[in-house]
Image (tube, rainbow, N blue to C red):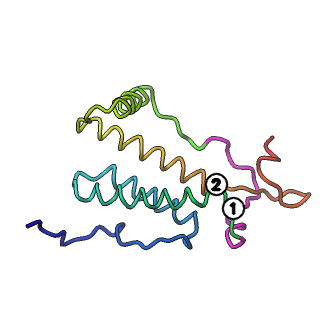
Amino acid sequence: MATPLTQTHPLLSIPFSAATDFTELAGYCELCAETLLESDDPALRMALCGRLSACIALLKSTLNDPVPHHLAESLTVDILPPVSLDFDPDSELLCDYSLAVAELITGGSLSRERERTLTGLLAELVCYFAADLKAPRWIRTPDGVRCIGEVAA
């Protein structure tokens, strides 16, 4: 008989649904990915992966939805933000990521080392994705509020 988990990680009990703001969902994804990266407990890792996947799937289904009006102010800035979201892994990590993804694509069984590499890739991608979702979209100008892409172009 399997022993049930007596302690639940706090991240596993955070509720989210289609009504949750995408910025909150993005932050939750970041926390899950970072915790997943730091965890060595197989049961917790499996649970975090499941929650992360569910949250990402929920985000994916809303990517083309308009930004809710109540979030517009938090996504509007007075000064143009820096262009880069700071996704700049070194060449060693890029090599490891590439090798891990190639192994996955070809269907080879993953070693613990490759699993950790893929977890690192997942964490970096999720953090990049979340930063992009939470980034400002509009800027206040003398001519009124405009899309950042219009001003930066």
Number of marks in picture: 2
- The reply to whether the magenta stretch includes residue 82 is yes
Q: Which residue does the image show at 56% across and 73% down from the upper left?
A: 19
Q: Which residue does the image show at 44% across and 26% down from the upper left?
A: 91
The quadrant where residue 140 appears: bottom right
Amino acid carrying label 2: it is Ala
Q: Is residue 130 left or right of residue 69?
A: left
Image marks 2 and 1: residues in contact by CB distance under 8 Å: yes
How far apart are the two marked residues, 2 and 1, measured between alpha carbons?
7 Å
Please name the residue that numbered disc 2 is placed on.
135
Above or below — where is 19 with respect to 55?
below
Pick the front one: 18 or 121: 18
Dot 2: within a 10 Å radius of its alpha carbon, few (fewer than 14), some, or many (20 or more) residues? some
The quadrant where residue 15 appears: bottom left
Task: Give the mark nearest the N terminus, 2 or 1.
Answer: 1
Pick the front one: 99 or 103: 103
Range of magenta residues: 69-84
Q: Residue furthest front?
A: 107
Amino acid carrying label 1: it is Leu
Above or below — where is 56 with respect to 87?
below
Q: Quadrant of the C terminus?
A: top right
Q: Is residue 113 left or right of residue 119?
A: left
Q: Which residue does the image show at 22% across and 53% down from the upper left?
A: 42
Residue 128, percent across and down?
A: 53, 47
Residue 82, percent across and down?
A: 67, 45
Please name the residue that numbered disc 1 is placed on.
75
